[in-house]
Amino acid sequence: MPALHLFTHFLPNIHPLHATPFSCRKNLSTNLPTFSLRMSSSSPRHASLASVAPLEAILFDIDGTLVGFNGGEPISEEFFIKNLSGMHNEELCHVLFPDWDIERSRKFLEDKEAMFRRLAAEQLKPVTGLDKLCKWVDDNGFKRAAVTNAPRENAEMMISLLGLGEFFELLIVGSECERAKPFPDPYLEALQKLGLSSEHAFVFEDSVSGINAGVAAGMPVVGLATRNPESLLSEAGATMVIKDYTDSKLWAALEDLAKKTGEVEVTA
């Protein structure tokens, strides 16, 4: 759900978050196991990235994880975190416009996405240190995929503007899966298409919704506190939380993981 704050002065009165029905989402599947959409402090989680050695793939969210934005008309940070962060547009139909018919709300959100694409070229910027991380991934030959709840047209545009069209092997869009994040379906589909197990991959995410999805798919998640509080991301189940890709604890973990990956491959 990219950059809703860029045009919030056009929004009607916004209703507080309530239990969001999923009836508007197409092809809703009940085949996958249910899971808690918020991790508790006692929930199992990966203690470190080293648990996935030998590493084979890294999966990235896009908005807030690869890119940030300058400018725009801000809404309350508290409101955004509680009600909007990481949500799929079909969910926002009910959250923002509970009294509208579904076609009207979908049309509004389609217009919102078109406005986003017009503004993004000027306001989009890579998260600090992204180029260094991408080079590390390339140099080590790890597989990679982008996994997002953003519309495909937005996702492809952001990847292109960042110059990462050749970097990603795969783009998975939540609305094209049985269920979008916070369910694990998009990450499970990415793993399936890459031909990999969750035991040898990890995720970069910036929202509670995305972290829930990554953890439910069986992978450790590195949370980026680009727009959500560190404590919220940690509570959601992030293995570690960083400000950006220059964080020293991230690089210590990556170096340790690369070393363990090399040791396992030599032994095998």
Image (cartoon, rainbow, N blue to C red):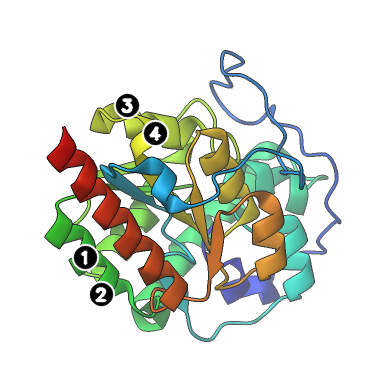
* Position of the C terminus by quadrant: top left
CA separation, marks 2 and 1? 6 Å
Circle nearer the N terminus (1, 4): 1
Location of residue 192 with respect to 202 vertically, above or below: above
Task: Name which residue type carries label 1.
Answer: Trp
Is label 2 in a helix, a strand or a loop? helix
Q: Could one spot residue 143 in this view of the protein?
A: no
Residue at 38% over, 42% down:
52
Q: Residue 192 carries which label?
A: 3
Q: Distance between the residues labelled 2 and 4?
A: 25 Å
Image coords of residue 42 (percent x, y): 76, 42
Residue 78, given in percent of the width and then of the height, sits at: 78, 70
Q: Which residue is drawn at 34% across and 32% down?
A: 191
Q: Nearer the viewer, residue 94 or 158?
A: 158
Q: Residue at x 65, y 31 (%)?
A: 24
Q: Distance between the residues labelled 3 and 2?
A: 27 Å
The label nearer to you, 2 versus 4, is: 4
Q: Which amino acid does label 2 sit on?
A: Lys
The residue to which callout 2 is attached is 132
| Residue 3 visible in image | yes
Q: Quadrant of the N terminus?
A: bottom right
51 left or right of 90 in image: left
Q: Residue 199 carries which label?
A: 4
Residue 116, above or below 61? below
